[in-house]
Structure formats: structure tokens, C-alpha cells
Amino acid sequence: MVVLYSALLLGILGFGFGALLAYSAKVFEVKEDPRIEEIISVLPGANCGMCGYPGCEAYARAIVKKNEDPGKCVPGKASGVEAKIREILKKKVE
Amino acid sequence: MKIFLIFVSAILVHNFVLQRFLGICPFLGVSKKIDTAIGMSFAVLFVMVLASSITWFLEGILRALGIGFLRTIVFILVIASLVQFVELFMKKFSPALYEALGIYLPLITTNCAILGLAILNVQLEYGFLEMLFHSIGTGVGFGLALILFASIREKLDLQEVPKSFQGTASALITAGLLSMAFMGFQGLVKL
């Protein structure tokens, strides 16, 4: 009985809170430019800070929002990250 | 009357940070500026009151089913979900505060002050109203300690401190002195 009750209670609680969080994630969703996500996936993700921003995410945000120069990523120079970012920036915002 | 005494005692006499020494991590981490300290206090107060209310009801269920050994994991589940909720809410309505609190916001999940409060409410066998005021008092007490400490640290930044005492060293000494000052409230309330 103890096993059944434990599993049942934790299952119900986990499901309940999970549903609540899923619902509130929809309600409180922050709409962001989808290009930011794309640029983050193109950047090396080393968070080295050589571009002058604290991490790749902050740099991607600055490229889209503050028109920052996309050629500041030093570790990504060899693999042509700059060209990829420019490609993403050309896409229109839906 | 007893409820009022519990409330005052939770703020001053049994202050969570300065007397029970719980929740020291955010106490030292987010006390550099008063603004972030106030934001953190409200986040903690909200999570504390809601978490201890929910866990109080869950404790009844746990006892009825005879599975009290699951207390810790169930309480942590409640607290973690609530912190996630606060995080989502704050990201939407106050991005600046979200950025300022940084890692300390998700760290409320593992904050011993909140789990400590939930377990203390059970151990002291409080009724619902007593539990509610104990939780609010504890949250207010945490906020009071944090804001007092932040304002002292802001002042301290303007003073010339010997090099070996700069930063965290003087902050820890200040925290110790503040804790000693709060010992003066011992005996104010007899419960």
C-alpha cells in the first residue's frame, strides 16, 4: 500500500505542477526575435568574451537589437561564422 | 495574541538569517545593491508563503496516508515548481530585475531557508493561521535582514577600507556584527 500511495501522490503532484508550469510558460511567454536563437546556434558557444560581451547569447542579442558588427567573433573566424550570421540577418522578421 | 507573538518572533527573535543562520547564500550574494535586495526579498517572501501553505496541506495528506518519509522530496517538488513559476513571471514583467538577480533566482529552489521553514512549520505543529503568520514573518524577517545588510554594504563601499578587508571580508564581519545586534532581541518574546 505504501508503494502505491507514494507513487500515486508523487505522480499526481508531479503531473499537476508540470501542467501548471507548462500553462504559465505559455501565458508568460516572452516573444523574442527568432533570429537571436539562430545566431546563437551558429556561434561557437565558447562564451569566451573576446567580442566584448559576456557570452555568446549576449553577443547574439546585441547583433540583432543594437546592429552590432557580426565580425567580432574571434574563435569563429576560421569557420566563417560572420558570413553565416549575415545570411541569418538578411532574413525578414516575420 | 499568540499569532502576533509568532509573527514578531519570526521577524526579530528567530530571524532566519541572523539567528537561525539559514539562507546565507542569497544574503551575501544579492546584497550589493538595495534595489536587487528588495526584489529578492519579495521573491523569497512570495515563495515562502505559498510554498509553506501548500506544504502544510500536503503534510496532512502525507500523514493520513502514512508516508511521512516522503516529506523532503515532496516539499522540494513544491518549492522547485514555485521558483520556476516566479522565474517565468519575473522574466515577463521585470526583465531588469531578472537580469540583476541572475543565478540567485533559480537558487531559491535549493535555499535552505524555504525548506527549513516548511519543515519547521510541521515540527512546531502549527495550525493554519499560525503557520501563515509564521511564514509571512519569516519572509519579512529575511527581507529586513537583507535590506539592512545591503544598505550597510552600500555605505561601506564609500568608505576607505584597508585592502585586506575589502569586499567579502568586510561583508562577513558586518554580517557577524548584525547577527550579534539581533541577539539583543532574545527574550523579547516568550513563546
Image: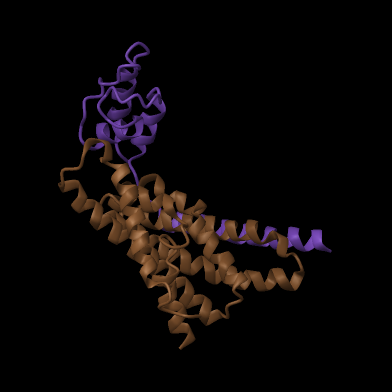
The x, y position of residue B178, in whole percent, is 33, 59
The answer to whether residue A84 is above or below residue B158 is above
Image quadrant in which you'd find residue A62: top left
The answer to whether A58 appears left or right of B106 in the picture is left
**Residue B190: image x %, image y %?**
47, 80
Tell me what residue is drawn at x 47 percent, y 78 percent: B6
B90 displayed left or right of B80: left
Q: Position of residue A22 (x, y in %)?
A: 52, 55
- Between A28 and B84, the residue placed more toward the observer is B84
- Give coordinates of residue B124: x percent, y percent: 59, 73
**Front in this rendered view, residue B170 or A73:** B170
Quadrant showing the N terminus of chain B = bottom left
Residue A85 is left or right of residue B188, and the answer is left
- The answer to whether residue A67 is above or below residue B169 is above
Q: Kindly indicate the quadrant of the structure image that contains residue B163.
A: top left
Does any portion of residue B93 appear in the rendered image? no
Q: Colour of chain B?
A: brown
Chain A: colour as depicted: purple
Q: For the image shown, how many numbered marks are present on the structure?
A: 0
Question: Which residue is pictured at 40% across the width and 48% down the height?
Answer: B104
Work out whether A59 lies above or below B73.
Answer: above
